[in-house]
Amino acid sequence: MQAALDEIHGFLPCRTPDQWIENALVNQDLMLIDHAHCEKKAASTALSLMYRYVDNPELLNKMSRLAREELRHFEQVLAIMKKRGVAYDHLTPARYAAELRKEVRTEDPGRLVDVLIVGAIIEARSCERFAALAPHLDEALETFYSSLLKSEARHYQDYLKLAEKAAGAPIDDRVAVFLDIEKGLIEKPDTEFRFHSGPVASASAKPAAP
């Protein structure tokens, strides 16, 4: 697993700021709620790709597996929340995914390539954050977040390989464009704490309950 983490650290443009870790530790209920939303959205993204690109057998197989895994993770987060008395509720989404997707081209094959690159970045960042958070959490959450590392790392690799295949050419330039956007989203201050937010000032780190 360490080799996969090393690869992800080499891929991402920056590490998660310490301030975000501190935000997460004082917002663990909110972190779990948003984590559940993220797993559900990840499954939805995979399914939408399956519906749109029905003539791509490799994509269909990988996205089918990914969707099942993400929904299983969603169920696991809900179970943890239930044990802790945390209600699953609506949240305003982080700016993270929406800002990344603004750069996605509108016509295929460029659109597919970009959507897959964004998927790879989101999965890589999720993996990096699980690893960064795990040592600071209670035993149950540490075990759970550590258990997610392998699948998230594989999802990142699957998305990136599919993007390269869809492009039929090197994608380094497009990846660099999205990673530059991602770096700003991760390092610049945010107004609300979310699983993929930037750091929030300590005084406003604990927002009102949803």
Image (cartoon, helix red, strand yellow):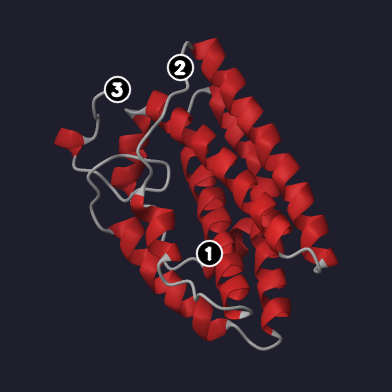
Q: Quadrant of the C terminus?
A: top left
Relative height, residue 120 to residue 86 (above, below) = below
**Residue that lies at the very extreme toward the left in this rendered image:** 203
Q: CA distance from mark 2 to mark 1?
A: 30 Å
In this image, 123 relative to 88: left or right?
right
Horizontal side of 166 relative to 9 (left or right) equals: right
In this view, 130 is above or below 136? below
- Kind of residue sitting beneath label 2: Ala
Please give the label number shown on residue 118. Answer: 1
The reply to whether the C-beta atoms of the residues labelled 2 and 1 are less than 8 Å apart is no
Residue 151 is situated, as x and y percent measured from the top left of the image, at: 70, 47
Residue farthest along the bottom direction in this orientation:
169
- Report the side of 107 relative to 97 (left or right): right
Q: Residues within 10 Å of mark 1 (few under 14, many from 20)?
A: many
Q: Secondary structure at mark 3?
A: loop
Give percent across and percent down for residue 180: 39, 73
Quickly name the residue at label 2: 87
Identify the residue position indicated by label 3 in the image: 209
Q: CA distance from mark 3 to mark 2?
A: 10 Å
The structure residue drawn at horizontal position 66% and vertical position 82%, both measured from the top left corner, is 167
Determine which of the numbered discs, if any, sits on residue 102 in the image.
Answer: none
Residue 54: quarter of image? bottom right
Q: Is residue 38 above or below residue 121?
A: above
Q: Secondary structure at mark 1?
A: helix
Residue 16 x/y as whole percent: 39, 53
Q: Quadrant of residue 76?
A: top right
Which is more toward the observer, 72 or 22? 72
Q: Which comes before the other along the chain, label 3 or label 2?
A: 2
User: Which is nearer the N-term, disc 3 or disc 1?
Assistant: 1
